[in-house]
Amino acid sequence: MQKKRSRIQIINQQKVLDAGTEVFAKYGSRGATIDQIAEMAGMSKPNLLYYFKSKKEIYLAVLEQTLNKWLQCLMEWQVTGSPEETITNYINKKFEFSRDHAAGSRVFANEILEGAPILKSLLGEELMRLVGEDTRVIKGWIKDDLIRPIEPIHLIFMIWAVTQHYADFSAQIETLTGKTLDDEKFYKQAKKTVTQIILNGVLK
C-alpha cells in the first residue's frame, strides 16, 4: 500500500515538476540536467532525488501532468450544447492552456517532434477514445445539418495547431508583435479572431 504523501511532500514534488517543465521546455529532454532542475526548484540535488529518482522519472511526470491537462480540454467537445457554443468553449480552453501552460505545451510539442518515444505509451487508448467520441459529436452535427459537411478530425487538428502555436512558437510571435498571450488585449484579440475564422468556416 502506497504511503500517503504529506502536504510538504506534495508541495515539493510540484515544485520539481514546475521546475522540470521550465527546464525541459528550454533545453529539451536530452539537454536538461538534474542540477538545472534542482536549481530552478530552489532545492539541493539530494533533496530533489528524494522525490524523483532520475531525470527520466521527472520528464515522464511532467509529460503526464501536461497530457492530463491537455486531455481535459478535449473533454469539452462532450459538453451538450450547440456547435457554436461547444467549439467556442473548446477554443477558449485551448487558448487558456497555451497561456497558462506554455512551457508544458513546448515540452509536449518537442516530445512529439522527436517521434513521441515516451508519449506513445501514455497517449494510447485514452486519446483515441476521446478523439473518437469528439468526432462522433461532430458527425452528429453534420447529420443534423447544423454545420457544413467537413471531415471532423481535420477540424480538431486545426484547432490544436492554431491554439498551440501561440505557446510553442511564442518567441516568434513576440518577435513579430512584441506581445505574448500574457498581454490581455492580445490574448482576447487572438481568441476572437481564431474563433471567428473557424466558426465562419464550419457553421451554416
Image: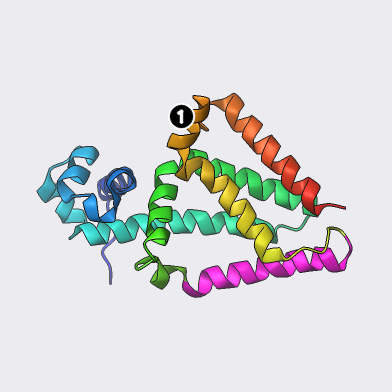
Horizontal and vertical percent for residue 101?
45, 43
Between 10 and 99, the residue placed more toward the observer is 99
Q: In the displayed structure, does residue 120 sit left or right of residue 125?
A: left
Q: In the displayed structure, does residue 129 sit left or right of residue 199?
A: left
Secondary element at image label 1? helix
The residue under label 1 is which amino acid type?
Answer: Thr
Quadrant, the N terminus? bottom left
Colour basis: rainbow
82 shown above or below 124: above
30 shown above or below 91: below
Q: Dot 1: within a 10 Å radius of its alpha carbon, few (fewer than 14), some, or many (20 or more) residues? A: few
| Quadrant housing residue 109 | bottom left
Q: Which residue is mark 1?
A: 175
Between 4 and 90, the residue placed more toward the observer is 90
Residue placed at 83% from the left, 52% from the top? 203
Instruction: Count numbered badges in the picture.
Output: 1
Horizontal and vertical percent for residue 153?
66, 65
Residue placed at 52% from the left, 33% from the top? 181
| Quadrant housing residue 23 | top left
Q: In the displayed structure, does residue 193 sit left or right of residue 58?
A: right
Horizontal and vertical percent for residue 24?
30, 49
Horizontal and vertical percent for residue 106?
41, 48
Is residue 188 in the magenta section?
no
Residue placed at 65% from the left, 30% from the top? 189
Q: Which residues are magenta?
A: 124-145
Between 161 and 17, the residue placed more toward the observer is 161
Give the dominant element type of the magenta stretch: helix, strand or loop.
helix
Residue placed at 88% from the left, 53% from the top? 204
Query: Hey, which residue is sitting farthest bottom in the picture?
Result: 125
| Quadrant housing residue 95 | top right
